[in-house]
Image (spheres, rainbow, N blue to C red):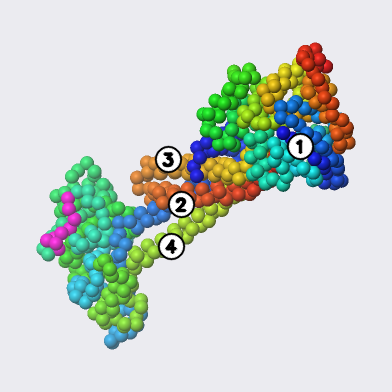
Amino acid sequence: MIDIDNINEIWQTIARNKTRSILTAFGVFWGIFILVILLSCGNGFKNGMMRQIEGFATNSAFVFTMPTTEAYKGYQKGRQWEFEMSDIQSIKNNVKGIDIITPVTSIYTYNGDNNVFYSTKGGSFGIKGVSPEYNEVERSKLLYGRFINETDIVEGRKVCVIGKKVYEDIIGLDKNPVGLMIKARGIYYQVVGVVQTYNENVMINGNLNETVLLPLTTMQKAYNLGDKFELLVFTAAKGSNIKDLQESVKDIIKERHDISPTDNEAVMSVDFEQLFKVFEALFTGIAVLIWIVGIGTLMSGVVGVSNIMLVTIKERTREIGIRRALGAKPSLIIKQILEESLLLTVLAGIVGLMIGVAIMAVVANFVNISSEDAVMFVEPNISFVTAISATVIIVLSGLLAGILPAKRATQIKAIDAIREE
Amino acid sequence: MIKLEGINKTYFGAQPLHVLKGIDLNVEEGELVSIMGASGSGKSTLLNILGILDNYDEGNYYLAGKLVKNLTENQAAEFRNRFIGFIFQSFNLIPFKTAVENVALPLFYQGVPRKKRNQMALEYLDRFGLKDWADHYPNELSGGQKQRVSIARALVTSPKIILADEPTGALDSKTSVEVMKILREVNASGITMIIVTHERGIANLTNKIVHLKDGVIENIKENNLGSIDLERDVK
Ligand SMILES: Nc1ncnc2c1ncn2[C@@H]1O[C@H](COP(=O)(O)OP(=O)(O)O)[C@@H](O)[C@H]1O
Ligand SMILES: [Mg+2]
C-alpha cells in the first residue's frame, strides 16, 4: 500500500539524519556502481572484440590447400596441389546450402620490395585476385568508384580496385584515383575503385587496405597462374550449417584432386562461426564472472546496510521508544524500518546506477574521440534490460537488508526510551 | 478514572527487586494528584504501569472502567495513543523533528492527515505561546520551551489522563512554576492529571498528595489549595 504520509515520515527520518543515511547507503551505492562499471567494461571489451571480426560474414568459411599426408591413387604423399576454377562449379552443383562461393589467389611481396607504382611513386603491397562476390565475404567501404564486376572477370580486363593505404601512399589523397593507371608487378592496370576495410584485424591473406585487387581471371592470365587459385571462400545460406558444408566441400575437393578421403590435413578450413562461438563463450564467461563479483559486492553492501541499520537501531532506541509510547504499533515500526531500508537502498542503488552509467558514457565518448578505430573497447555500457534487472536486485536487496533491523526494532519497548539515566 | 487494586511489581534483575508491594489507589476524573516519595521508592515504576508502558505482576488496574491486564502490544499502543498523554523529565522530543512535527506525531499514529494534524499541533503550540517556535528543532529551544512542546504533544490527542514524571525535574524554579501553572490550567479544563515528583513545592500545587515509601502507599493527603499564589508558594 502506498501511503504518502508514511513515506513522508520515512523520508524525513532519512533526510534529517543525513550522515547516518549516507553511511548506511554507501555500500549499496558502491556495489551497484562497481557492478555497472564492470558490466560496462565487459561489454566494451566484448563489443571491441566483436568489432574485430565484424565485416566478415559470420557464417563464412575458407578452405585452403596443404601438401597431402597420404599416398593415394598412385600419388606420393607430400604432393602440392591447387584449386582449379572448375572446382567452384562442381561445388555449386553438388553442395546444397551454399550462398556465396568465391575463389581468391594472392601474390605476396616476400622481401618488402616495392611492387606497385603510380608514376614513380611505389610501395610494397599485396596483390589479390578476386571475383565480384568477394566483396560480400570481406566487406569493405567503397571510397571511390566501384568494386570488380562480372564484365571484368569475363573479359579479363586490366583494371584494379586498390586499398585505402595504397591510394594514400602512391597516389595521394588529393587526387581522384579513378581512371589513373598504376603498375603492379610490371603490368599496368586502370584504377576503378578504392576500398577501405571495416576491420584491420581479421583479414584474408593480408590487410585489404594494403592490397591491390585484380579480377581473378586477369590475374591468372597476367601472371601465368593457369586456372589455379589458392583459397576458396564461401558462406552458408540461411538455414544451413557451416560445419556440415565444410565437410561436403572438402569431400568434393578431395575427390576432384585425387586426395585420400582419410587425409585430414591436405584440405584445411576455418570458419568464423567457430571463432565467433569462442568469443561468445569467452564473453559469456566474463559476464558471469562480473555478475558474481558485482552481486558479491552488492551483497556485502546489503550486509553493510543491514549491519549499520542494526547499530543505528540501537542508537535510535530512544526515538523508537518515544514513537511506541505515543502509540506506534509494532507493525508500523516494522513497516517503517523496512521502508527506510528500501528507500535508502533504492536511492543509493539508483544513484550508483546513474553515476556508473554517466561515467561510462563519458569514457565511451572519450574512447570514441581518441581513436576512430578504437578497436579494443567499444560502446562500454549496459543494456536497458541489465539496468532493469539491476534495479530489481536493488529493491530485493533493500527489503532483505531491512529484515533484521526491523525485527530488532520491534524488540524496543516504549519503556526503554522512557527510562532515565 | 483510575482504580488500582493490590498492584505488585518485581524487577527480575541480577537480584529480584520487589518495588511495588500492593498498591491500592483511586483517582477520580478531573483530579490533580501528585505522587511523592524518595528516589528509588517506585514512583516512576508506578507511573509507567499507569501509562501501560510497563506491566505489573499482581493486582488489577482499571482505566476508565476497563481492566488493563495482559494487553497485546497493539492494544497497549491504542490505549496510550487515545487515553494517555505523557510528560517526561527529559522531554523525550524527537531531535530531528521540529516542534510542530513533534506535537503532531501522536496524531500521525491515529492516521490524521498531515495538514489537519499540523494545524492542530500549531493550535496547541499557540496555546502555550510557542507559535513562533513551531519550526524550531528541540535543540534550539530552552528547557521550559521544550517542556511546553511536550505538554502540547501530550494534549494534542485530547487524552483522558496526563501522566507526568518529574515534569519540572530538569527545569529551574522559575520555569518550574510556569510549567506547573500550565499543568494546573490543563487540569482545570477537566483532564485528570497525575504528577510524580520528589519536590514538596511541586506536590503542594496539587490537590491530592500520595506518599510512597518502600513500595507501599504511606498516606494520601488532601491538599486544599484554595486560591494560592504560585509565585509565592513554590519554594
Ligand atoms: N528496569 C528495571 N530493572 C531493574 N530495576 C529497576 C528497573 N527500573 C527501576 N528499577 C529499580 O526499581 C527501584 C524503583 O525505581 P523507580 O520507580 O524508578 O523509582 P523512582 O522513580 O521513585 O526514583 C529503583 O531501585 C530502581 O533502581
Ligand atoms: Mg523516577
Callout 2 secondary element: helix
Asked if residue B6 is among those painted magenta in the image, a careful observer would answer no
Query: Which disc is residue A2 wearing?
Result: none
Callout 1 secondary element: strand
Q: Chain of mark 2?
A: A
What's the magenta region?
A: A145-153
Marks 1,4: beta carbons within 8 A:
no
Please state which amino acid type lies under the numbered disc 4.
Ala
At 80% from the left edge and 12% from the top edge, which residue is drawn? B232
Residue matched to label 4: A281
Q: Is residue A179 left or right of residue B195?
A: left
Q: Where in the figure is residue B173, as x and y percent of width and height?
A: 78, 18
Q: Tell which of A154 and B171 is nearer to you.
A: B171
Residue matched to label 3: A362
Please state which amino acid type lies under the numbered disc 1.
Lys
Query: Which disc is residue A389 wearing?
Result: 2
